[in-house]
Amino acid sequence: MNQPMAIDDLVSVAQAEAMGELDAPMMAIVLSSEQSYDLPINSLETDADKARWGLILRAAREHVEADAVAVLYPAWTTIRQKKPEPEAEQRSEDAAESPGEGESSPIDTLFVQLHTRDHVYWRGFEQIRDPKHQRIIGFRRIKALSTDYKRDEAPSVTAWLSTLFEPLPDEGEETAVDRELADLLEEPEVTAALYPRQMRALH
């Protein structure tokens, strides 16, 4: 898989899914060598949600022997702006009293993450909305939130996906986690989602 091309393709998918909506959908795409499979995510609000979905995505990845998993989700983010250097020692009275200097308002952001065995590709986009209806009409890339990481150097915010590529147990060895993974594969929300993208509308 050409990873830089893959992340660009995923960005296009994420933006197409969100365009015209009031909220960008939260979903995962499991990318096997032959097909891509969608898993709509209902919540990542709590640590328990993240732990559960971390297991679900690992189970789904192993089930289709995928080499990559993408996660698409909206979030409010705040980017700290670096204060500009004053042009003179004495700053103007107006500038000194300007409210909110060096601060930023939260940005309605769409995140696209591509997790592979070795890297995490991360892209962030500001969601542009129609002022009247508040529907999403476009996106603006946020360079400060667009970074590629080696997997062992990824930010702690991705820790809930740290087990995505853990090796399978030795043959004949079964752990409590493996039994839980097997149970998760039987959940309706997972089995219903494990169809190729182009087949989802038929089921």
Image: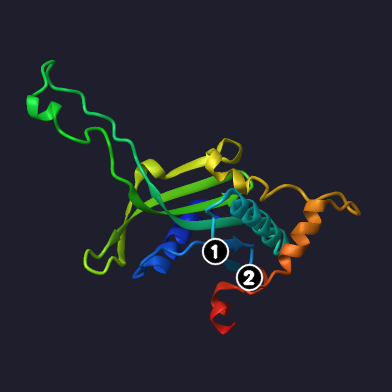
> Could you tell whether 68 is left or right of 79 in the image?
right
- Out of 122 and 104, give the one closest to the viewer: 104
| Circle 1 Cα neighbour tier, 10 Å, few/some/many (<14 / 14–19 / ≥20) | few
* Nearer to us in this view, 46 or 8: 46
Seen in the picture, residue 28 relative to 51 is either above or below; the reply is below
Label 2 sits on what residue type? Glu
Under circle 2, the secondary element is: helix
Q: Is residue 53 visible?
A: yes
Give the residue at mark 2.
189
> Which one is earlier in the sequence, the residue at label 1 or at label 2?
1
The residue at the point 52 percent across, 53 percent down is: 45
Q: Position of residue 153 (x, y in %)?
A: 56, 35
Q: Is residue 59 above or below residue 162?
A: below
Q: Is residue 121 left or right of residue 33?
A: left
Residue 194 location (% of width, % of height)? 64, 71
Farthest residue toward the right?
A: 172
Task: Name the residue tied to disc 1.
Answer: 42
Q: Quadrant of the N terminus?
A: bottom right
- Tag 1 and tag 2, C-beta contact below 8 Å: yes
Give above or below for 157 relative to 96. Answer: below
Q: Residue furthest bottom?
A: 202
Q: The disc labelled 1 sits on which kind of residue? A: Asn
What residue lies at 72% left-to-right and 63% top-to-bottom?
A: 184
Residue 33, horizontal then vertical, whole percent: 64, 63
Residue name at image x 43 percent, y 59 percent: 11
Q: Is residue 140 left or right of 163 when viewed as pictured?
A: left
Quadrant housing residue 56:
bottom right
